[in-house]
């Protein structure tokens, strides 16, 4: 599949499975290698500014303004169990349904500059805007690479996965901000599994609706 084909064929598709009866976990070490390959390609995205030095002193020391935290299928099911038990971590039905189906969950965070205000997690400045844009580009690389591999994927904003208690449970540092929770789903599943496509695909217009030539 070439780049144009991957862009054209990428689709948002959610798998919804009864959280009380999750799909069996069938993927193993080979699939984990595929995920590492996907994230390596994601990491080819451009970024304008390096992450702040305080971030580079953490467990993950990269200069990139993004981080990826990965749960395999077994960990997705364990997270599902914890979300059901812990009151502060209660999850929406949609997140629980997807965790019951996912082969993997990739949490993509971005690294804000230190804020001078205790009431703000980050300044709405150009540097942080660049960090968010770069992380979004990395996530898109990930989605296209997964599409090229024939892996059904869905980019969620995270919902309850953004809760401090959930992030703490997953060991994600407090100074990282979740930008995308990317679910990777199996291509084969029982007919009883519900699916839902992205709600905005039909809202997309034609080129003339969002592009113009600037004549000087």
Image: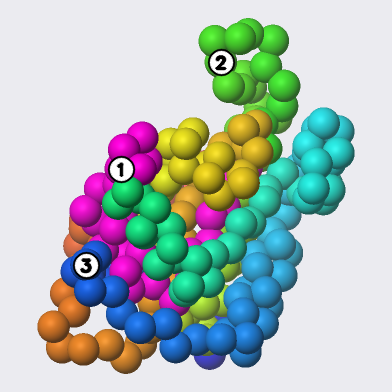
Badge 3 or badge 1: first in the primary sequence: 3
Going 58% across and 63% down the picture, which residue do you hit?
Answer: 70
Of labels 3 and 2, the one closer to you? 3
Would you place residue 96 above or below residue 104 in this image?
A: above
| Inter-mark Cα distance, 2 to 1 | 25 Å
Q: Nearer the viewer, mark 2 or mark 1?
A: 1
| Residue 127 coordinates in the image, percent (x, y) | 70, 30
**Percent position of residue 210, x then y:** 36, 49
Q: Is residue 38 above or below residue 62?
A: below
Residue 50, quarter of the rendered image: top right
> Helix or strand or loop: what does disc 3 sit on?
loop
Q: Is residue 121 above or below residue 36?
A: above
Q: Dot 3: few (<14), some (14–19), or many (≥20) neighbours within 10 Å?
A: few
Q: Is residue 114 left or right of residue 38?
A: right
Mark nearer the N terminus (3 vs 2): 3
Q: Which residue is mark 2?
A: 120
Q: Of the numbered discs in the image, which one, if any, rests on residue 90? A: 1
Q: Where, by quadrant of the figure, is residue 24 drawn? A: bottom left
The range drawn in magenta is 86-110
Q: Which mark is residue 20?
A: 3
Classed neighbour count for the residue bearing mark 1: other residues with Cα under 10 Å, few (<14), some (14–19), many (≥20)? some
Residue in front for this viewpoint, 150 or 205: 150
Q: Is residue 12 left or right of residue 202?
A: right
- Horizontal and vertical percent for residue 21? 23, 74
Rendered residue at 50%/86% (across/down): 27
Disc 3 to disc 2, C-alpha distance: 38 Å
State whether residue 5 appears in this view: no
């Amino acid at each position: 599949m070439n780049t144009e084909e991957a862009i054209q064929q990428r689709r948002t598709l959610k798998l919804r499975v009864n959280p009380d009866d999750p799909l069996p976990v069938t993927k193993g070490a080979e699939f984990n290698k595929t995920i590492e390959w996907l994230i390596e390609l994601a990491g080819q995205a451009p970024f304008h500014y390096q992450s702040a030095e305080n971030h580079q002193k953490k467990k993950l020391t990269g200069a990139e303004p993004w981080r990826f935290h990965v749960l395999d299928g077994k960990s997705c099911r364990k997270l599902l169990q914890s979300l059901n038990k812990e009151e502060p971590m209660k999850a929406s039905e949609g997140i629980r349904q997807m965790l019951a189906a996912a082969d993997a969950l990739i949490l993509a965070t971005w690294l804000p500059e230190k804020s001078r205000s205790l009431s703000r997690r980050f300044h709405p400045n150009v540097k942080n805007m660049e960090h968010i844009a770069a992380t979004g580009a990395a996530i898109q690389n990930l989605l296209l690479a997964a599409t090229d591999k024939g892996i059904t994927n869905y980019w969620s904003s995270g919902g309850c996965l953004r809760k401090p208690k959930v992030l703490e449970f997953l060991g994600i540092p407090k100074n990282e901000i979740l930008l995308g929770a990317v679910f990777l789903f199996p291509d084969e599943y029982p007919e009883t599994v519900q699916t839902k496509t992205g709600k905005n695909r039909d809202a997309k217009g034609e080129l003339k609706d969002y592009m113009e030539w600037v004549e000087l």
